[in-house]
Amino acid sequence: MMGTAPSDFIMPTYRRSPVEFVRGEGANLFDVAGVSYVDLVGGIAVTSVGHCHPRVVEAIAEQSARLIHTSNLYVTRPQIDLAHRLAELTNGMSSFFTNSGAEAIECALKLARKWGRTTKGPTATKVVCARNSFHGRTFGALSATGQPAKQEPFAPMVPGFVHVEYGDTAALSNAMDDDVCAVLLEPIQGEAGVVEPPADYLPAVRQLCDERRVLLLLDEVQTGLGRVGEWFAHRLFGVSPDVMCLAKALGGGLPIGACLARGDLAGVLQPGDHATTFGGGPVQCAAACAVLDVIAEEGLVERSHKLGLRARERLASELPDEVDVRGAGLLIGIALPEDRAADLALATLEQHVLINDVTPSVLRIAPPLVISEESLDRALDVVMKVVGESL
Ligand SMILES: *Cc1c(COP(=O)(O)O)cnc(C)c1O
């Protein structure tokens, strides 16, 4: 492996792998020596349409030659087009565009609190979230994140967040008092290690939210846009959110997120309530439109479902029983009996397969949805060999 040493002038917030990539194509990355790697990380569930998809490259090149930035004081065609495309996919939801997943969560939280205060009363500001959840690193999103270890160094958190066991309907019901304005959940917990709730959980949560007049905010930053073999993970469970956050795959690698709200909630945030200088810029939006086109035209949602099913069947049947294989579509967790994930990710890297050690004991597979069956099979062979040898 070849690359540049980490820089003294970059804050050491990441333990970076010892490899420097210079080019990407489809599901492959190439290092400085030209060596090809199969990418089962996908830029952390970002590059769903593959690295440097020609349609995305062209959209960015064309738009950046025409207009890069205006601010949101003016309308631009790419932003309008993207909002229309997302509305078509979501039965008419309205978008606020951001630069990241965490910012989409911030928007959802502000919308929920303003809605609670104006429709239920000034104390209806509490948000119920799940333990082990992940919603981002800004203060609102971090306060919603159910991981004390990520919060403690930065205490105090924003008040008004309550955490309950994920998948436990009774615990959620108990937490939903009159001061609650919203429930915020991932339909499948990604960073927790690809954790699926029981099949009846989200329908029960939806019903509780309706009965108690509470908004259901779904964080689909990681699970959205085909990753789980449906356009959105909530469709796997037959529920619809009131507010939904997207990001990761949306821009094909450019930074863009979106907070989407049901039609009747679209006017909760009024001029002056919320803003962003860069959010929804024409280049990001043009890239996102191209991404949505590619996902639809290349049948990537269906492909994610099919390849994911096959991959999970292979992994489950060929790995020993003490390894738990789980997930939906091409969002797959391999839960190990011991905290060996980091070592194993390094071992597959040496064999030119990239995999994410998302927790100390879970490896996560989230490749570009365009990955070929042969490429995926070969990479899974490497992963299974490395996991098998570690047991
Ligand atoms: C990655 C992620 C976020 C945060 O997105 P950023 O773009 O890193 O701010 C929020 N929620 C979930 C579920 C994520 O996977």
Image (cartoon, rainbow, N blue to C red):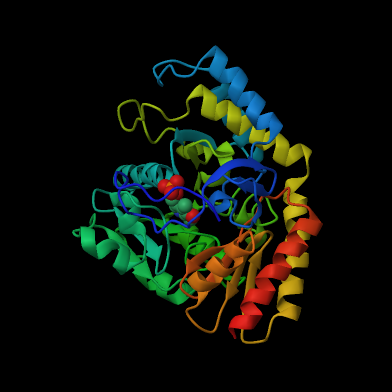
Residue 159 placed where, x, y %?
23, 57
For the N terminus, give its image quadrant: bottom right
| Residue occupying the point 57% across, 65% down | 364
Q: Is residue 87 above or below residue 66?
A: below
Foreground: 389 or 99?
389
State the image coordinates of residue 7 (x, y, percent, origin top left): 35, 47
Q: Is residue 268 left or right of residue 139?
A: right
Judged left or right of residue 228, residue 191 is left
* Residue 129 sits above or below residue 24 on the image: below
Pick whichever, 78 or 4, lies toward us.
4
Quarter occupied by residue 40: bottom right
Residue at left offset 54%, top offset 60%: 187
Q: Which residue is drawn at 23% across and 57% down?
A: 157
List x then y, in percent, for residue 125: 29, 52
For the image, the number of numbered tags is 0
Extreme residue in the top direction: 66
Q: Is residue 2 above or below residue 98?
A: below
Residue 382 occupies which quadrant of the picture? Answer: bottom right
Q: Is residue 381 visible?
A: yes
Residue 194 in view of the camera: no
Task: Name the residue nearer the viewer: 203 or 278.
Answer: 278
Q: In this view, does 382 lie to the left or right of 69?
A: right
- Quadrant containing the C terminus is bottom right
Q: Residue furthest left?
A: 156
